Image: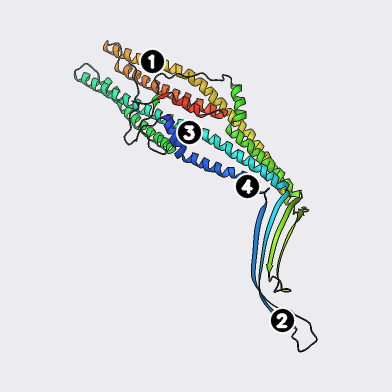
Amino acid sequence: MMLIVAVQCIPGMADGMGLLEAYESALMNDPTFRAAIHENEAGQQAIALGRAGLLPSLTITHLQGLSRGTQRTPDNNPLTPDRTSLHFNSEVTTLTLRQPLLNMEALAGYDQGHARANSSQAKFLGQSYELIVRLVEAYVKTLLAQDRFFLANAQLKALEELKLVNENMLRRGEGTRTDVLETQSRHALAQAQVIEAQDELDVARLALEAIVGQEVAQLDSLSGTFKAQPIHPPDFESWRQMALERNAELVTQRHVVTTNQLEVKKSLAGHAPRVDLVASLNRQNSASFLFPDRDATFASVGVEVNLPLYAGGRVVATTNQAQANKARAEADLDAMSDKVLVELRRQFQLLQSSIKRIESLELAVDSALLLVQATEKSIKGGVRINLDLLDAQSQLFSAQVNLAEARYSYLLSYLKLRLAAGSLILEDLEKVASYFVEKP
């Protein structure tokens, strides 16, 4: 009978959690994703910042002061003083409206704000998809660690039983000291493997809990009717075209390139004239030594034209800097494209090999199980020895762990391939979740 690995409840864990439940929890609790949300919120403000340069600005300025001085009045009459003391409070209030009519720098800044917001949005979508992959990766790593832990325990228990059998047979004179020593050696090694597997499980569980933000108990296990699906579309070129068009990192970087191109345009606008409509309302109370007791209110409206002539080389320097940053962004885009295509090829081939590997390991597990059964019968018949059974059991446990790992690798490669291609959606997570069943 084939050995079935049961995912038991680990002491200290809370309630069980399925893959979709874990995803819902990760959306609320994963700190990396929460940081991505706030980063995108900040990035979306670039639109408003860019638009602000094209909208009117309204300012009010108020000046209030105490003036002290003297006024001299030349006079030839010696009886009349030629100096008069002036002491008064002055208030000046000005309301100014400025509306850009022609501002090339502000226009470039407006387009740049949209490019930055689009870049932020594309990056956030990519981080949303990455959350799915990170979660599933942590989930299956925990399951694989559980499989290894329980398989190691099962192997340890089998060796304990075999150790007792060997010792009893030795006492009856039917066994050999060599069989006992062989079993004891394997038993000690199995104990060390159980400790190692427990440590691996603890670390994997902590990594998963960090994403979902809570303790987890038993996880859904792989269905016994696991069936790998063929790759669709089957050719790599289709995936390549999809990745170049839709990969989140590439889309984000293209917006970065656009932002840098607009920065060049914005820098060049330093040579362009600027035309503003300016209107002001000015109120002055006792604001002049010449007319200290007079108040005045007046309004003005007009067009202000600023024509830059020379700024110490600042415009040329900023333009050269912007062009260099644009060239760097384009080079980063090329490097990122190469990186994405390498990852895409790796996941495509890994998915293909995982399908074949699963088929081979399923046969290996069946064969290893039959070998254990046949070895047990052969030992009873005196054809095989104790060491043969130990080797057969070890081969079975290794095949089972390798099969579980291959299945998890297939599911991860499926998600990572679609992530690299920019086609990962929530339905893909639901499809992967369908491979798991809740433990009764």
Q: Secondary structure at mark 4?
A: helix
Q: CA distance from mark 3 to mark 1?
A: 32 Å
Q: Is residue 439 above or below residue 282?
A: above
Q: Is residue 143 visible?
A: yes
Q: Is residue 343 left or right of residue 382?
A: right
First in sequence, mark 3 or 1: give its number.
3
Write down the quadrant of residue 92 in the picture: bottom right
Name which residue type carries label 3.
Answer: Arg
Check disc 4 and report the residue beneath it: 49
Mark in the foreground, 2 or 3: 2
Q: CA distance from mark 2 to mark 4?
A: 54 Å
Q: Count neighbours of disc 4 (C-alpha within 10 A) and say few if under 14, some if 14 to 19, many if 20 or more.
A: some
Check disc 3 and report the residue beneath it: 134
Q: Secondary structure at mark 2?
A: strand
Q: CA distance from mark 3 to mark 4?
A: 34 Å
Q: Count neighbours of disc 2 (C-alpha within 10 A) and say few if under 14, some if 14 to 19, many if 20 or more.
A: few
Q: CA distance from mark 2 to mark 3?
A: 84 Å
First in sequence, mark 2 or 4: give its number.
4
Q: Is residue 325 visible?
A: no
Q: Secondary structure at mark 1?
A: helix
Check disc 1 and report the residue beneath it: 366
Measuring 66% from the left and 38% from the top, which residue is drawn there? 257
Q: Secondary structure at mark 3?
A: helix
If the image is split into quadrants, where does the N terminus sit?
Answer: top left
In the depicted view, which residue is nearer to us: 48 or 176?
48
Mark in the foreground, 2 or 4: 2
Write down the quadrant of residue 303 in the picture: bottom right
Q: Is residue 270 left or right of residue 335?
A: right
* Mark sitting on residue 84: 2
In the depicted view, which residue is nearer to us: 407 or 158?
407
Write down the quadrant of residue 141 in the picture: top left
